[in-house]
Structure formats: structure tokens, C-alpha cells
Image (tube, rainbow, N blue to C red):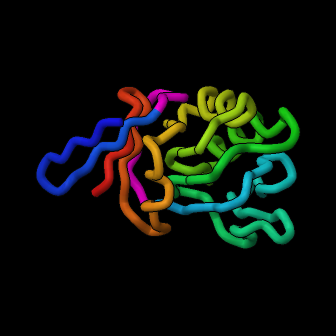
Amino acid sequence: MHRLRSGRKMELKARSISKGTATGNLLISRDAISFYGGVDPNTGTIVEKDHSLEGKSIAGKVLVFPKGKGSTVGSYTIYRLKKNKVAPLAIINKETEAIVAVGAIISDIPAIDKLEKDAYKNLKTGQIVTVDGNKGVLILK
């Protein structure tokens, strides 16, 4: 585990899934996300009944969720979200599985997972962060 402090920023090591960088507000889900059927690809709104983010938009957010679930069509749904300009800015997972990894890569959405131990419990919805998928780090502002 490695933490660097430079001024007021802290960098947390992670595994890079999809290259690129993005800065924005965190939106945290305690539930796995099914992009096929669980997210409206036209609006970016979570539509899965009883999901912790039901009714909330993931558009323009740094989306944190444990993992993806559901059909492999979810990769294409992530791509549709991006084409419709309602995709998350970046994705952070506890552990990324193939559906989310492929969706992020084909959509040019920076994605990381496996943040250093216990880092997830310190993240808060609304917090501004930078996901650096090139270096595999999360920068807390």
C-alpha cells in the first residue's frame, strides 16, 4: 500500500482497468449494477427496482460500485450511455469483472479497481476525485 501526500491531495494506488483520466463528484452505490436492464441508456438513470441508487442519474459522475452483474449486453449499454452523453465520467469498482471492463474500454471511460485496503469506506458521495486509469491511482482532492 502506498499513499502520497502532495499539498492537499492524496493518491491511492489501484489497478488500472481502462486508460484515461477524469475528475468529478463521486456517486457511491452499495449494490452491484446491471447495466443491461438496470440503467436507462437514454438518460443514465438507475431504473432497477430497490437498487440503492434507484432514480438517480450516473451521468457525469465518478461511479463507485462493488461490481457489475447481469448480461454481457451490459458492455454495449455502457457504450450507448457514452454515445448518448449520459455515461459516468469514470468507474471505480472493488473488483471489475469482464462486462464492466469491456464497456469502459470500448467507451473510453477511465476505470480502476482494487483500491488499497479500506480506502472504500473513506469515500463519500459528492466528494471530488480524479481517476487516473493511466497510472492506476485515485486522487482525493
Q: Nearer the viewer, residue 40 or 38?
A: 38
> Residue, x 69% and y 44% (percent of image)?
67
> Residue, x 41% and y 56% (percent of image)?
24
Magenta range: 15-25
From the top left corner, tell me how far across and down residue 130 is, in percent. 36, 47
Q: Is residue 69 above or below residue 58?
A: above
From the top left corner, tell me how far across and down residue 13 is, in percent. 38, 36
Q: Is-magenta flag for residue 19?
A: yes
Asked if residue 88 lies left or right of residue 116, the reply is: right
Q: Nearer the viewer, residue 127 or 31?
A: 31
Q: Is-magenta flag for residue 3?
A: no
> Residue, x 68% and y 58% (percent of image)?
44
Residue 116, by quadrant, is: top left
> Residue, x 78% and y 66% (percent of image)?
51
Residue 82, by quadrant, is: top right
From the top left corner, tell me how far across and down residue 22 is, in percent. 41, 44
What quarter of the picture does the C terminus occupy? bottom left
Q: How many labels sit on residues?
A: 0
What quarter of the picture does the N terminus occupy? top left
Q: Nearer the viewer, residue 116 or 111?
A: 116
- Main SS, magenta region, reads strand
